[in-house]
Image (cartoon, helix red, strand yellow):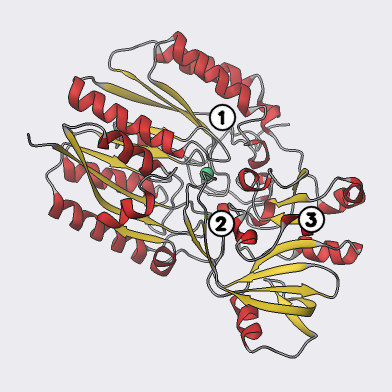
Amino acid sequence: MIRKRIALLGIYHETNTFAPEATDLGAFHNGFWLEQEQILAEYGGGNHEISGMAEVIGQIGALSLVPVFYAYATPGGMVTNEALETLLSRMFELLEASGPFVGILVAPHGAGVSELHPDMDGYWLHELRSRVGSEIPVIGTLDPHANVSSLMASGTTALFPYQTNPHLDQAEAGRKAARLMVSILLDGKQYEQTLLQLPMAISIEQQNTSEDPCRSLLKYAEELRGAFNLQSVSLLLGFPYADVAEMGSAFLLIYEKGNTDVIKATEKLLDYVNARLETFNGAKTDIYTLIPQLPGLEKPVLLLDMGDNVGGGGTAASTHLLEAFDEARLSRMFICIYDPRAVKTLEQNPALPFSLRVGESGYEVSVVSSRLIDGHFSESTPKHGGFVNFDMGQSAIVATASGQTIMLTSLRTVPYSLQQLLSKGLKPDDFDYIVAKGVNAPIAAYQEVCKNICKIDTPGTTGADMTRFDFLNRRIPLFPFEYD
Ligand SMILES: [Zn+2]
C-alpha cells in the first residue's frame, strides 16, 4: 500500500515591534533551523506541537508524515526582509523537492511581524496556499499569543492554538490538528473555520489560564462548543506588544461545513466578554510598592519581571529589580542577565574583587566571586515552550558584595526550566528571591520550588500597561485603550 504523504513545516516567531533589535538570520541560526529528519530528532516524542502531530500520524497506517522545514528564533524585534525571504525560499525549495502531498501540517506562532509584512504569518500561509492549491487541507497549531488575522484564517483549513498558559498542552494542540487532518483525508469530512476578533486585548498579567478571568472564559467556550456541536472553540489571548492591525484577543471556531449555529456561538462569546471587560485588566504593581511586603513572605519568592519578558521580546538585560534590591538593602537574589560583554570580561579572569558593569543600564556591581559555565542545558519534563535543548552561549555566575547572585549569558535565554539553575550547581533554596524575566510562562518551572509568586510591573519593551505604548495600527475600539 502506498501511504498518503503529509508535509510538516513551520516558521515560528513572536515579534515585539517595540523591541529595538531586529530578528535577523543569525537569530534563527541561534534558535532552531531544522530540515527534514532533524525536525523529529529534536521534537519527536516530546511535548511540542510537532511531537503531537507526529504521534497521531505515526499511528495511521495509510498516512505518513514528511518533515520538511522548521525555523524558530527567540522572541524579539521585527524579522528582517532578508531573514524571511531566505527562510521562505529554503522552505518552499524543500517542499517542492519532497512532494507531492495530500495535506500540509503547519506550526506557526501567529504573532510574527516582518519589516515588509506586518502580518508575517498571514503572508507566508497564503504563499503556501498559492503553491499547493486550494484543494488540499492546510491545518496547523498556533501559540495562544497569536494575533490572528483574517488572512491567516482564510489561508488555512483550521488552526488549533494551545489552550493553556503556561503552555503545557502543545503536544495536545498538535494532536488536534493531526486528528482533523485524518478526519478529512480518511473519513471525507469537511470543515470550516470562523475568526472572531474580540474588542479587547487581554492584559499579559491576566493571561494565566488556570486563574480567572481566563479559566471561566475557557469553560464558557467549552460549554458553547458542546451546545452548538462545534469541533473546537479556541481562545487566543493575543500578544499586546505588536503594533499591527490584528493585535488583540480572539476566538477561532472550527465546525463541520454547513453548521450555521456558529453565528449564535460568536454572539454569545461577544456578550460574555463585553459584560466583563474590566476583569481582563491587570493590577500593575511596581517594585517599590511591593518591597515593604517582601521580607514577610515565605521564601523563596519568585519575582516576575514583566517589563523584561524574554519570551515576549524583552532585552533580557534589564537591571531594574537588581538595582531596587541593592538600594533597599535586600539580598539573596538570583537574577539572570544577558550581557555578552560582561562575560568576555570575566573570561579574562580579573583579580577579585573587581567592579563590573552589567546589563543594558551598565549598572556597576562589586564582584566577590566568579566562575565560567557552559551555556547548554536540557529539560526532560513538559514545560512551557516544549523545548528540550537550551543554549545560553558562554556564561558565568558571579556573587556580588551586596549578596546577590547574577548569571550572565551570551545569548538571550527564556526562563522556562529549573535546569538553568540546577544543572549549573545552583539550588533554588539557597536564594530568598528568584527573578524570572517573564509573566506566566516561568510559573510552570518555578512553582514547585517557590513559596510565593509576585508579578511586578517593571519598565521595558513588555511593560504590563499596554496603554503606555504608542500604537498606530491597532484596531479601534479596543479595551483597555478606549475605555474609562
Ligand atoms: Zn505564548
Task: State how far apart marks 3 and 2 are (Cα).
Answer: 23 Å
Dot 1 alpha-carbon crowd within 10 angstroms: few under 14, some 14 to 19, many 20 or more? many
Mark 2 — residue? 313
Residue 363, horizontal then vertical, whole percent: 76, 74
Residue 248, horizontal then vertical, whole percent: 54, 37
Disc assigned to residue 30: none
Dot 3 alpha-carbon crowd within 10 angstroms: few under 14, some 14 to 19, many 20 or more? many
Viewer-nearest residue: 371 or 143 = 371
Dot 2 alpha-carbon crowd within 10 angstroms: few under 14, some 14 to 19, many 20 or more? many
* Residues at circles 1 and 3 in contact by the CB criterion of under 8 Å: no
Viewer-nearest residue: 460 or 190 = 190
Circle 2: element type: loop
Q: Nearer the viewer, mark 1 or mark 2?
A: 2
Q: Amino acid at mark 3?
A: Tyr
Relative placement, left or right, of 311 versus 119 is right
Q: Is residue 424 above or below residue 108?
A: below
Mark 3 — residue? 433
Viewer-nearest residue: 34 or 216 = 34
> Residue at 62% across / 73% down in the picture?
339
Decide if ligand 1 comes within 8 Å of the CB at mark 3. no
Relative placement, left or right, of 457 versus 44 is right
Q: Earlier in the sequence, mark 3 or mark 2?
A: 2
Q: Amino acid at mark 2?
A: Gly
Mark 1 — residue? 199
Viewer-nearest residue: 56 or 229 = 56
